[in-house]
Image (cartoon, helix red, strand yellow):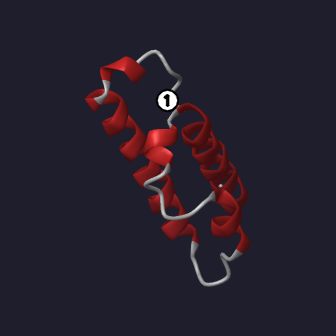
Amino acid sequence: MRTLNSVLTEITQLTSNIETNFPELYQYLDENPITLIGDNSEIGFKEFENYLETLKEQLKDYIESHPHHKTKRAA
């Protein structure tokens, strides 16, 4: 079973990967991992899981629509 900490860690890692390897996609994210994780008092576990899945889907869609990035590590 996943914990809130593991989901937040995965969000941070994925967001860092996007920032490093896909800066053209990163610029469209409305937040960075520092602010997202820094203010989570009103956000529940399910919202973080949904956000993580949204990030994964955005990256997958981006890679599929930009074939020159297929050699980069997705996550």
Percent x, y of residue 33: 65, 58
Q: Residue at x 59, y 47 (%)?
A: 15
Residue placed most toward the observer, 19 or 15: 19
Q: Residue at x 71, y 62 (%)?
A: 34
Q: Residue at x 64, y 43 (%)?
A: 16
Residue placed most toward the observer, 42 or 66: 66
Percent x, y of residue 23: 52, 40
Vertical comparison of 33 with 25: above or below: below
Please, which residue is most extreme toward the top here?
71
Q: Residue at x 49, y 29 (%)?
A: 74
Please, which residue is most extreme toward the left here?
65
Tell me which amino acid carries mark 1.
Ala
14 to the left or right of 47: right
Percent x, y of residue 49: 51, 59
Task: Give residue 37's quadrant in the image.
Answer: bottom right
Residue matched to label 1: 74
Residue placed most toward the observer, 51 or 49: 51
The C terminus sits in image quarter: top right
